[in-house]
Image: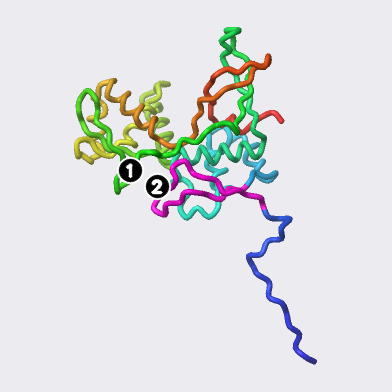
């Protein structure tokens, strides 16, 4: 009996009907702050299987939904998704939301003509990306001189990992001090600032930051916000009567729970 040829099957082959559609999207940071300079990412669409995440009360209530969705849907990144800049994560989440539920998003908006809060419809497809236009130094840091004290600051942008650390820090702070007052704004600044007048010790930096004038701290935060890449959430909402009202898109966990 002659030997029959047995065709070899590629173990990585997936039939087309089982493949999840995806797009390659541009990152607002253009990858300039990543070691591999990854400027685009492959992102799969949300599927019926992903509804297990969206419908889990424990995950949706604590904000973990965003971490899980990015971990599931971002492919071929080359590094841990938690190390994506927060601004790039937001761009990915906006893509997931828009492709899953469509571009229309409803939220309460202040209507100047009626002087009331009313439901307005925002077209998510009209939101624009803010690209990184200020060049970082070789360490991925940016410079700013405080206007009042004259101190020179070097700072960085926050990642998803940083945001998780800040959540823990703030929760522990409120529990330890038995207070409902959040210290999140200061913890963010501590994470962002890497040196002050050449001082890189984090404890000393923290002490200096605690004693900054409000003018210096506000100007620093404003500058960081101005140059940080991401999504421009300043937009317009269509009101019931057809008029358009300027508004700001509120991006939070409820973003992924529209009424279909």
Q: Which residue is mark 2?
A: 32
Name the residue located 43 percent from the left edge and 37 percent from the top edge.
Answer: 229
Name the residue located 34 percent from the left edge and 29 percent from the top edge.
Answer: 223
Q: Is residue 215 above or below residue 68?
A: above
Please name the colour scheme applied to the rendered image: rainbow
The answer, for residue 72, to whether it is visible in the render is no
Please state which of residues 254 and 99 is positioned toward the viewer in this rendering: 99
Asked which secondary structure carries label 1, the reply is loop
| The quadrant where residue 141 appears | top left
Instruction: Please rate how many residues cluster around mark 1, counting C-alpha atoms within 10 Å: few if below 14, some from 14 to 19, many from 20.
Output: some
Q: Which residue is mark 1?
A: 136
Q: Quadrant of the N terminus?
A: bottom right
Asked which secondary structure carries label 2, the reply is loop
Outermost residue, top side: 114
Q: Is residue 134 above or below residue 222?
A: below
Q: Is residue 21 magenta?
A: yes
In the image: residue 198, left or right of residue 239 = left
Q: Are marks 2 and 1 in contact (CB under 8 Å)?
A: yes
């Amino acid at each position: 009996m002659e030997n029959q040829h047995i065709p070899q099957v590629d173990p990585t082959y997936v039939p087309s009907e089982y493949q999840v559609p995806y797009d390659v999207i541009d990152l607002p940071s253009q990858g300039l702050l990543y070691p591999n300079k990854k400027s685009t990412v492959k992102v799969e669409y949300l599927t019926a299987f992903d509804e297990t995440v969206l419908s889990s009360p424990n995950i949706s209530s604590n904000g973990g939904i965003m971490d899980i969705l990015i971990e599931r849907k971002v492919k071929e990144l080359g590094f841990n998704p938690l190390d994506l800049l927060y601004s790039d994560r937001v761009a990915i989440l906006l893509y997931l939301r828009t492709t899953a539920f469509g571009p229309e998003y409803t939220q309460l908006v202040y209507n100047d003509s009626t002087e009331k809060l009313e439901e307005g419809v925002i077209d998510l497809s009209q939101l624009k990306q803010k690209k990184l236009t200020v060049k970082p130094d070789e360490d991925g840091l940016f410079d700013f001189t405080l206007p009042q004290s004259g101190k020179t600051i070097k700072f960085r942008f926050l990642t998803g990992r940083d945001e998780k650390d800040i959540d823990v820090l703030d929760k522990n702070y409120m529990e330890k001090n038995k207070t409902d007052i959040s210290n999140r704004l200061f913890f963010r600044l501590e994470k962002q600032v890497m040196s002050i007048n050449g001082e890189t010790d984090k404890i000393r930096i923290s002490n200096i930051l605690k004693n900054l004038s409000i003018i210096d701290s506000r100007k620093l935060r404003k500058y960081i916000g101005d140059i940080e890449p991401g999504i421009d959430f300043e937009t317009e909402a269509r009101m019931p009567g057809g008029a358009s009202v300027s508004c700001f898109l509120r991006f939070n966990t409820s973003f992924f729970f529209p009424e279909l």
